[in-house]
Amino acid sequence: MNDADGRLQARLGYVFNDPGLLGQALTHRSCGAHNNERLEFLGDAILGFVVADLLFAANPDAHEGRLTRLRAHLVRRETLAAVARNLQLGESLSLGPGELKSGGRDRDSILADAFEAVIGAIYRDGGVASCRTVLETLYSDRLARAAVEIALKDPKTRLQETLQGQGRALPQYKVVDLDGAPHDQSFTVACLVDGIPNPMTGFGSSRRKAEQDAATKALAELDGDA
């Protein structure tokens, strides 16, 4: 094991019983047949499962659609590459001459694949519990930020994303009543949502506010059904 691998294990917070697994995880296919592609395949599945489990535990009130969106954000290539950079994983990669010349150590695709392979190697070396411990530490800030960002989105956006995540049709809004003088109007909006039998009714001093109110009630209804 070289110094770079030792530093990487320290940053991971995990020491391999079989250092050969880590070496394989850090070996790009440009180096030959004994590369990280199989471990990457395994790590992709483990990563998705463990991140889903962490989200499930951290967001007890979130419905399926919200959890699905959060997981997709946390396991996308850009996020994996960012985590890999924080680990300085690139300095430990074994790359072929062509990849070295073209800047492969800092390429999103190579870093993301290698990070998945490292997670696969940790699973083979220490099991799911070890993967969970490592990922819980690496993702702690991102898990917190992702939940806050989703919560801060306006109700109409959250409703639309929730329905899309569940494969349902988008909501439809219709003004059903308009009362008051032009400078002091009151809007009533009906929101038709796939999966909710009756329209959700919202009220507000503008059409937008009434639609937001209706969307908030629709989200509450969907959360109650989740």
Image (cartoon, grey):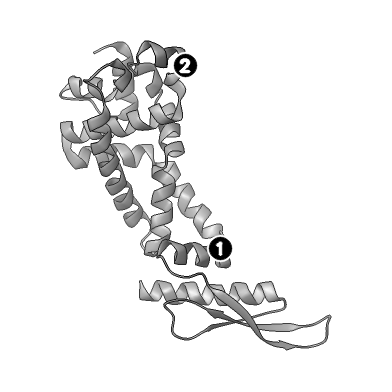
Taking depth in this image into account, of 16 and 82 the one nearest to the observer is 82
20 w.r.t. 168: above or below: above
* Residue 86 lies in quadrant: top left
82 w.r.t. 168: above or below: above
Taking depth in this image into account, of 59 and 38 the one nearest to the observer is 38
Could you say which disc has been placed on residue 48 in the image? none
212 w.r.t. 74: above or below: below
Could you say which disc has been placed on residue 102 in the image? 2
> Residue 127, percent across and down?
17, 38
Assign a secondary structure to mark 2. Answer: loop
Q: Are the residues flagged by discs 1 and 2 in contact, CB closer than 8 Å?
A: no
> Residue 170, percent across and down?
51, 69
* Residue 179 lies in quadrant: bottom right
Assign a secondary structure to mark 1. Answer: helix
Q: What is the distance, in whole Å, between disc 1 and disc 2 at their CAs?
A: 40 Å
- Say few, some or many: other residues with alpha carbon within 10 Å of mark 1 (under 14 / 14 to 19 / 20 or more): few
Taking depth in this image into account, of 145 and 79 the one nearest to the observer is 79
Disc 1 versus disc 2: nearer the observer: 2
> Residue 199, percent across and down?
52, 84
Residue at screen point 45% across, 33% down? 82
What amino acid is at disc 2? Ser
> Residue 125, percent across and down?
16, 31
Residue at screen point 32% across, 29% down? 12
Quarter in which the C terminus is drawn: bottom left
Can residue 57 be spotted in the picture?
A: yes
What amino acid is at disc 1? Thr
Can residue 28 be spotted in the picture?
A: no
Q: Which residue is mark 1?
A: 157
